[in-house]
Image: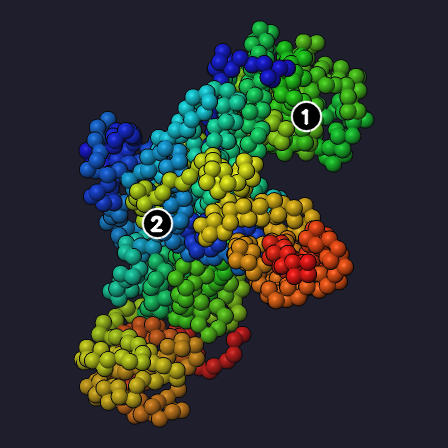
Amino acid sequence: MSTSEHDYESLGLVAGLEIHQQLDTETKLFCDSPTTLREPDEAERTLRRFLHPTKSELGELDEAALEESRVDREFEYLAYDTTCLVEEDDEPPTEVDGEALAVAMQIASLLDMRVVDQVHVMRKLVIDGSNTSGFQRTMLLGQEGEIETSDGPVSIVDLMLEEESAQRVEEREDGVLYSLDRLGIPLVEIGTGPDIRSPQQAKEAAQRIGMLLRSTGKVKRGLGTIRQDVNVSIAEGARVEIKGVQDLATIDELVEYEVGRQAELVEIAEELRDRDASVGETTDVTALFEETDSGVIGGALSSGGRVTAVPLYGFDGLVGRELQPDRRLGTELSDHAKRHGAGGIFHTDELPAYGVTDEEVVALRDAVDAGENDAVAIVAADPETAKLAIDAVAGRAETAIEGVPEETRGANEDGTTRYLRPLPGAARMYPETDVPPVEPDPSEVETPELLTEKVDRYEAELGLDAGLAEQVAYGRRMPLFEEAIAAGIDPTLAATTLESTLTELRRDDVPVGNLSDEQLLSVLFLVDGGDLAREGLTEVLSELAENPSLSAEEAIEAAGLGGVDENEVRDVIAGVVERNADQVAEEGMAAFSGLMGECMAELRGKADGETVSSILREEIGKRS
Amino acid sequence: MHPGDRVRVTRDDVTNEGVLMPSSDSDNLVIKLDGGYNIGIDRAEATVDVLETNVYDVGDDDTDDTDDSGDVSEITFEDDLPTISLISTGGTIASTVDYRTGAVTAQFDAEDVLRAVPELAGRANYRGRVVANILSENMDPSIWSDLATAVYEEIDAGADGVVVMHGTDTMQYSAAALSFMLETPVPIVFTGSQRSADRPSSDNVMNAICAVEAAKADCAEVLVCMHGSESDDSCALHRGTRVRKNHTSRRDAFETIGNQPLGTIAYEAATDDGADGSVATAAIEFVREYTERGERSLSIADDLEPAVELVKFTPGMDPRAWDYLDGMAGVVIEGTGLGHVHTDLIPRIESLVDDGTVVVMTSQCLAGRVCDRVYDTGRDLLDAGVVEAGDTLPGTAKVKLMWALANLAGEQTAVRDAMRSDLAGELTEESQPWR
């Protein structure tokens, strides 16, 4: 097993990316509901629905869609006081949201794409219940773009603006529970051409696109708001679509492991063909395990289950061969068994083990006429599942003789992947007649400044240090920072407050997530205008975070920092000087630094250091 | 270059290949790309090469291919199943989508309906028949007569129940019309869909199945069968003269005014219980008395007096708006509250009555009955000759007056009496609280 030493050029690696990013707009794409996510227990009511793709439609449905749809699946939806009848498919959609369209056009411009003259909203058939309507509204907005990577350009084929699906809350025996809060949030889908030739280039392209997206300041941040799909193939392998990569940092590893998997499968296939390998008939071998000590098999049998087996002639030793870290050909067979409801498989490359004895293995080999060069895989489950699952295992084993199967796989956290389903066929699409076409005007859209350019500008023009500049530019509160400095607030004050101060408060378990942009902005204004001392900033922010219903002014009051004018400050300072009259008489201005500390402590942030220091100097001066 | 041709379109440095669609405007070429997306490309800026002509038939979607109205199509599963007639007036309860072209085609004959709603198979034998192919806002009283005749003929030919598929906008008027025109020994059930049949989430499937099950059942009245809530759990069965569309888009838009629906039908239970042709008795519940199957014998009186208007009085109304009522055979007023109009309009009503127009009062409150003996205005209206229609719904009162004027012999008194009494469940004798 080698993963990092591949010669990608000679293996013929071809990869492409498909990136889905939620937009952070005020309202959803086809209604005026906010794009706010909710907790399931905040739901106000629920509704239950069935979807009915008609027979003529089913006739054209592909294998993947069929696997997802069973006609009597019932879907339940959670509705909130932030969702409306459009999400419930009980009211026609509005026209395309103007803000979402503008952001998508900015993205098109950053990707150097051509925006189409007239955008047509389409309905893409989706019958797994994740869209209440049974279709996803989607539109092709941009074509033929390009991004740069250090290994050369990567083409961007298309940019789609579409509805996000409903969030899956719970999988049930006969259906799914979905939450409507996420349904309809604007989502852009960006597809690259098959131009990527190395794992590093895949990562760099994904990072580049991610940076471009965030440069708009209008994309959602946080878990699940961006999803990457990666398409990978090698010359002798097959196109494999890997879904649901959440972490950009693992894309290179993911591609590397997938290349490794395909290369191993190609070698296994060659070996199998050399050995003239074949897959035998599946059979029921329950009788061999009547007395078994294996907990897994015994458990299945005691609840009326069966054991099924398939002989894999010529497979000995190969079923246990590693394709990716800790994932073997046997794991692939097992994935297919799981897909049909079984818990997994046992195979002779790993037996005897798990309570299955040597005698049982010998009996099993005998029963299916498997010699020492052969392998046997078994499944224990309820009778129907055991039959379906072993057939699926046999099918996957057949494919192993041919090579790498085309399929959709899911990304695991460690960078490996698992089988999900066959590749989807062509999407079933028809026009969304409820929404008129839009003729977008790209000239109305300003190309946003790139985050990389922002960092440079923050350093050069605003005088931020490099670290802070990058932190602010790439941070979540970049749009707020821009708003603050546009309003004339001191850039360093804004940057340190929005990054360092909030980070420190978060580390102290202050719920800074409660702070709204408006609250942060008004606190910054108060500091900048001299109505709140810098020294009181931290205290006011934590007061606000704990009591988010307060205004900034109320929080200042609540923190006991309000209502000081210069006379009061002077009184306090004069008092301090008075108390220390002897020291002042003795040391003169040299007493300043000691008394400064005492004054600040007494004023507790009611006045800023500069004011205190100048008054203190005056007061000391009066006495010396 | 024609719709359906495969074309290559170049605009600046971008080239697209796809099928030319019937364009929605003259400025843009609409191309369906191979991935399924449609895009519009500026005609003036584009260079087009036709690669292959006539790849797909993408003729206009609304081509009327149903000039076979009056034809009856039949599907028989088992001889001993009940026979249900499916009559269409043009709502799109059944339609198919061609994913290559995006064309949505409304379908009408029995086979088409079964293809669109396969769950209907086996629960009855079907006869399919098209009476009209119109949007329901284009419904016309002459079609009510055609519809009543078609239903009459179907029942006469042995149908055990009739399902009328109808657009939802004016379904309540058609249901009221048939309620007055027909005496029926079997159920006549109107149904339709609020959410188009070209979406997998359409309410058409549940409504159609419940309507067929209601048509197999025991309540031999004209009913409207539509979603009872936003969920796909049960349909409400409304009496045709008491029902009203009360929401523009929701599945459960139809409500019985001033009372619970006459009955409900549980979707999943009815689907299971009626699958083999049985009557899904346990799934259907009625909360009030109804006319039972076979209780009445079949008869038809489908004449209508066309010169009847329904007018709504609102504050600030220009009295000249009523000028056109001169010479009408009947006028139904949708008055305020207990049944009032501006005092200045009373002489106008008086002169209409004197000229032989039957003037009937209903209320825009919808729920509750008209009572013109309480206030002076009301008493003056009665003196002017207005007929109180009790708690009859304004729309129903219009249909009833059209029917009464055409069918009740000669004397105006007979018409006036009829408007004050219950003929088809439209007017309750006493106002009982909801039950």
* Residue position for label 1: A345
Residue in view at x 43 percent, y 80 percent? B368
> Which residue is the extreme one toward the top?
A274
Secondary structure beneath dot 2 equals loop
Which chain is mark 1 on?
A
Amino acid under disc 1: Ile
Task: For residue A270, say whether it is visible.
Answer: yes
In front of the other: A394 or B215:
A394
How many marks the image carries: the answer is: 2
Which chain is mark 2 on?
A
Depth check, mark 1 against mark 2: the one in front is 2
Neighbourhood count class around disc 1 (C-alpha, 10 Å): few under 14, some 14–19, many 20 upward: many
> Relative to B175, is A339 on the left or the right?
right
Q: Quadrant of the C terminus of chain B?
A: bottom right
Determine whether A35 is above or below A19 in the image. Answer: below
Q: Position of residue A403 (x, y in %)?
A: 53, 16
What's the mark number on residue A435? 2
> Relative to B394, is B235 on the left or the right?
right
Q: Position of residue A457 (x, y in %)?
A: 46, 38
Residue in view at x 26 percent, y 64 percent? B140
Q: Position of residue A540 (x, y in %)?
A: 63, 57
> Relative to A378, is A486 on the left or the right?
left
Residue in view at x 46 percent, y 20 percent? A151
Amino acid under disc 2: Val
